[in-house]
Image (spheres, rainbow, N blue to C red):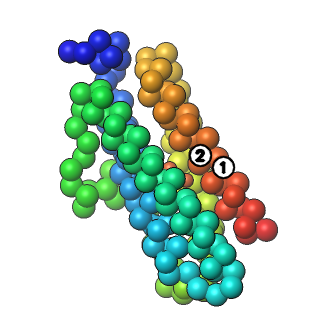
Amino acid sequence: MLKGQEIVKNRAEIIKELNRAAATELLAAYRYLFLSKVATGMHGREVAEKFAEMATGEWGHVATFLDRIVQLGGRPFEKVSEAEKLAFGKYLLPPKDATDWKRMLKDSIQGERDAIEFYHDLLEKVHMDDAVTMHIVREALEDEVEDEHTLASLLD
Ligand SMILES: [Fe+2]
Ligand SMILES: [Fe+2]
C-alpha cells in the first residue's frame, strides 16, 4: 500500500463520503448547465451566464473528488443512474417555466446550502486523519460559500 494511503486511518469511510460528494457535484453541474441553456427572458439570460460559470466550477469539483478517491485506492461510483441515490442533497428539478429565474435561484441556493452543510461536517470528520482530503473539501466549501453569496445577490 502507498504511504499516502497508509496514513489515512478511516480510508473506506472517507472514500464513501467522497463518492457521495462526487455524485452530488455531478448532478449540480448538469443542473446548472441545463439551467444556463433553458433560462429565458432578460433577467433569465443574465442569470444563465452565472449558471454556466457555476456549472464549470461544479465539474471541477467532480474531477477533484474522483482524483482523490482513486488516490486513496478507492473506486469512484460507476453507475451514473445511482447518482441521485448517492447524493447528499435532494436533486431539485428545474422549474417547468423557463422564465422563472427566481425559482431557479432559490432552488440553487438550497443546493449550495446543502453542500455547505455537508462539506462543513465532512471537514470535521476528516480533521487530523486526512490533511489532503481536508484541503480539497475546504476548497470546495469555499467555492460553495461563494456560489451561495453570488446566487443570493442575484435574487436581491
Ligand atoms: Fe460544488
Ligand atoms: Fe456550488
How crowded pointer 1 is (Cα within 10 Å; few <14, some 14-19, many 20+) is rated as few
Amino acid type indicated by mark 2:
Asp
- List x then y, in percent, for residue 2: 25, 15
Q: Residue at x 54, y 87 (%)?
A: 97
Q: Residue at x 31, y 56 (%)?
A: 83
* Quarter of the view holding residue 10: top left
Q: What number is the disc on residue 146?
A: 1
User: Mark 2 and 1 residues: CB-CB less than 8 Å, in contact?
Assistant: yes
How crowded pointer 2 is (Cα within 10 Å; few <14, some 14-19, many 20+) is rated as some
Q: Is residue 41 above or below residue 61?
A: below
Between 86 and 54, the residue placed more toward the observer is 54
- List x then y, in percent, for residue 21: 41, 45
- List x then y, in percent, for residue 88: 42, 49
Location of the N terminus by quadrant is top left
Between 30 and 46, the residue placed more toward the observer is 46
Q: Secondary structure at mark 2?
A: helix
Q: Is residue 22 above or below residue 31?
A: above
Amino acid type indicated by mark 1:
Glu
Q: What number is the disc on residue 59?
A: none
Mark 2 beta carbon near ligand 2 (under 8 Å): yes
Q: Residue at x 63, y 54 (%)?
A: 147
Between 82 and 54, the residue placed more toward the observer is 54
Extreme residue in the right direction: 156
Mark 1 beta carbon near ligand 2 (under 8 Å): yes
Q: How many marks?
A: 2
Location of the C terminus by quadrant is bottom right
Which residue corresponds to mark 2?
143
Is residue 70 found left or right of 21 in the rendered image? left
